[in-house]
Image: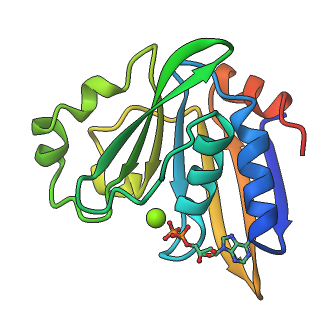
Amino acid sequence: MSHYKTTLPDEAATQALGKSLAHTLVPGLVIFLHGDLGAGKTALTRAMIHAAGFTGNVKSPTYTLAEPYQVKIRSQTTTIMHFDLYRMLSAEEFLDAGFREEFNASNICIVEWPEKADGVLPEPDLNVFLSVAGDGREVELQALSAKGIACLASLQF
Ligand code: ADP
Ligand code: MG
């Protein structure tokens, strides 16, 4: 499966999707989250990080731009890097912060507002498009690599 679309009628549905996605995570995976402010990008990320076993607070890294979380993926300690690039001013800022190096074979990178780092970000394995639909949300998942396809194929939702 390389494409999947569904509605998320309430926040619990967003959390359930995050939990399902967490079970498909593998080291090296890169996920881009697209959607307006309030679409649910952080809510979905938070659900993934918690379902991956992180018990602390997960807040939007609005000012720090990135936040690392240590989790266990298939009994291996792995870092999920959560990026929120909304306030990033230039691609240079991304490079100067050393963010490019975080996209490696061992980290899992989840990126809100990837548009802000156009040209310096690697290609994602998965694109997630979130939008407001009535009181709920619509979500579209698009796999762009073999890794992304495997991830969607194992998604149980
Ligand atoms: P973003 O990171 O995209 O700017 P947030 O995740 O910070 O958005 O905020 C999304 C808001 O929408 C939160 O208040 C959350 O409770 C709410 N929300 C998340 N998923 C749903 C859903 N499926 N239906 C309705 N509200 C939702
Ligand atoms: Mg956000």
Quadrant holding the N terminus = top right
Q: Residue at x 63, y 59 (%)?
A: 129
| Left or right, 104 with reference to 117 | right
| Left or right, 60 with reference to 35 | left
**Above-or-below relation of 91 to 7:** above
Colour scheme of the picture: rainbow
| Left or right, 103 with reference to 4 | left
Q: Position of residue 44 (x, y in %)?
A: 63, 56
**Above-or-below relation of 118 to 96:** below
Q: Position of residue 118 (x, y in %)?
A: 31, 48
Q: Nearer the viewer, residue 137 or 73?
A: 73
Residue 104 falls in image quadrant: top left
Q: Residue at x 68, y 14 (%)?
A: 74
Q: State the residue lying farthest toward the bottom.
A: 134
Q: Position of residue 19 (x, y in %)?
A: 75, 44
Q: Position of residue 59 (x, y in %)?
A: 43, 58
**Above-or-below relation of 80 to 35:** above
Q: How many marks?
A: 0
Q: State the residue lying farthest toward the right.
A: 156
